[in-house]
Amino acid sequence: MSARPAATPAHLRAQAAAALPEHRDPRDRRRPRGLAALVAGLLLSACPPRQTTTSPASDVWGDANSGAAREHAITRTRAPVGLPEPVLDFLAQETLKNLAQLQGDDAEVPAYFLAYDLVARDHLWLEAQDGQIVRNRTDTDRTVDVDVRVGTRQLDNSHPGDANYGPGNGLGSGMFVSVQDDPLALSQALWQYTEQQYKDALAAFSEAESAEQLKSQTEDKPPSPDFSEEKPNIHAEPPVELDLAALSKQWEPRLREVSAALAADPHVLESQVVFLAWVDNRAYVNSENTRIQGSQVRLRLMLQARTQADDGMTLDRFESFEAQDPEQLPAQAVLMATAKRLREELLALRVAPLAEPYAGPAVLAGRAAGVFFHEIFGHRLEGHRQKDDFEGQTFANMIGKRVLPVFLDMVDDPTAETLGGVPLSGHYHVDDEGVPAERVVLVERGKLRAFLLGRSPVLPFTKSNGHGRRERGNQAVGRQGNLIVTSRKTIPDRELRRALIDEVKRQNKPYGLWFSDIQGGYTITDRSGPQAFKVMPLLVYRVWPDGRPDELVRGVDIVGTPIAAFETIIATGDSPGIFNGMCVAESGEVPVSAVSPSLLLRNLEIERATHERGKPPLLPPPGAKPEPKNTAPAVKPKAVSSAPGAKDMSVAPARRRPR
């Protein structure tokens, strides 16, 4: 069963097999490369950093001349070509007809742009708890987003103000329409929703004009336009179908087995195994003669378990697998091993000591580093944040200036489909404003080069770079896709633990910190508070310089300010960690990826996390015997290996929290 040809399933299965839990010598902390919610100098004398001089390579993760980098090759494929469906012509006719009315003599303020975005979605939700299926639901719907712009490209109803990005300003509606292509039913819905969006656009434009009259503009910094002029884009992919009923039948017994393994301990208070499938077929038309027919398949397999420590702290472990084709999903052996590992890690966390506030050397391993960059840096490069006066605009005036260590490069590349055979969730061919996706160099040799832009440009940039994204019902804004960090100053991953201990000894600190998994966090980007961040790690270890075994701790939050945090990066590992997940921000929930090598930091600050003080359950679960308190689990806390997966990466306009 396949929605489209699998990218490189053989590579993916090898990658998943390599991610099975291993017990290693604590001095050899090699991290397997993998993925990770329900719904981001020191000269190492023992191993000198490898210096490279190439620009960010477009075809590989790292240095194109490195044999190690070639195994992390990025694959790109052309979009399949299909015949346009009749609904595209219908939408084009409705666009011209309705825009003509909105530009007529009776229009209070003429509209200069109109777009219809019609998305048909088939959806499967399959969920198991305690070895039994508790939800099996399929659904089909279709929505339309109506975007109306009044005013001019320089100033229109999309003008940022009060961090309001809709709905309610005429851009994005997400209203349900008939799932059948009945002309009269669709025409009636478009007429009704266009009228409603036009009235909302008028109100938003009036507010924008009033706000601009009160705002003083400096002569040396003209305001950026609200809407860019782009070339018409004609893009037609064949519609995609996936037999969700057959997929559900195939996965029901697998979910039951994995769910039973995940819940197989009385201390696991809650657990879920969820399989989600979305099949979207899209038709987008605007008044600039752009016509897009696209499709997307997204598959998510999530394992989540929860326990409670004796002091009342609730603890979670989570793993997610992301794919664009059923054949890319992991084998049952991988899922069973993941369920066992999550359960054992959860039990180890339950009896782990509470962490103390601390600042010192640290390693963010693999995907934890990707989350770190996504949350703290990537969101500050999204275009609309440079224009909104309510935003902190951390990097608004930093083009051409150093914002990261000189050995780091960063791109956002939605054209990348897989990395080393692992599907990247932030892949797409055309963005949600009808603009072709582009690979954008954001940082080169530590210097800021660009922002993530939709059709709301930020001077000196005047065009979109294909990053306008949204969930149905929201206004599109510049968002991350596949954020990829590469390094010119690397040490082998197997040497990172030794390098961390060397730095601990150099600073005469009692221990260092090793972060192997992060669930997300939030970062304050607006001016209502300090430009700070808080990231919530899930697995944190104390690494002792005297040879003692690593110690798992709980109740940790990473805190700090972005510029200061990035200045402390000493070096990186030499292989990518891949973090796939869903990011929630002003324009809704979109799939994203963050790729980064492990980071060695000179200094990272942690504080105690807040937690509830509720008592653990007094009654034992059915069929279980009461156990003595503080019974140690049969797992060594030092185990840090993890299988491919992802955790939701949260981002609300100001405070971003995981879902």
Image: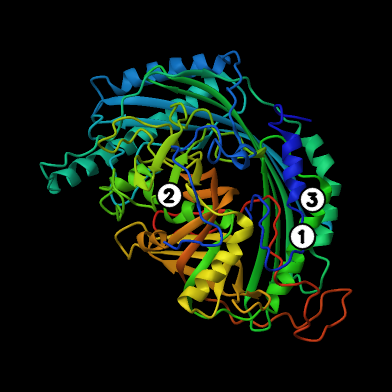
Q: What secondary structure is marked by label 3?
A: helix
Residue 309: x and y, percent?
68, 79
**Residue type of the residue flagged with mark 1:** Glu
**Quadrant position of residue 268:** bottom right
Q: Secondary structure at mark 1?
A: loop
**Quadrant (top left/top right/bottom left/bottom right) for the N terminus:** top right
In this rendering, the answer to whether 548 lies above or below 572 is: below
Disc 3 target residue: 334
Image point 63% across, 81% down: which residue? 353
Report x, y in % for residue 27. 67, 67
The CA distance from mark 2 to mark 1 is 32 Å
| Type of amino acid under label 3 | Val
Q: Looking at the image, which is closer to me, 22 or 265?
A: 22
Judged left or right of residue 214, residue 129 is right
- Foreground mark, 1 or 3? 1
Q: Which of label 2 and label 3 is nearer to you? A: 2
Whole-percent x, y for residue 126 in the image: 75, 47
Front: mark 2 or 1: 2
Identify the mark at residue 22; answer none if there is no mark: 1
* Front-most of residues 27 and 91: 27
Q: Where is residue 400 shown, x and y percent of the image?
A: 29, 43
Mark 2, secondary structure of its residue: loop
In the figure, 84 relative to 564: above or below?
A: above
Residue that label 2 marks: 407
Q: Nearer the viewer, residue 363 or 53?
A: 53
Q: Quadrant of the C terminus?
A: bottom right
Q: Are marks 1 and 3 in contact (CB under 8 Å)?
A: no
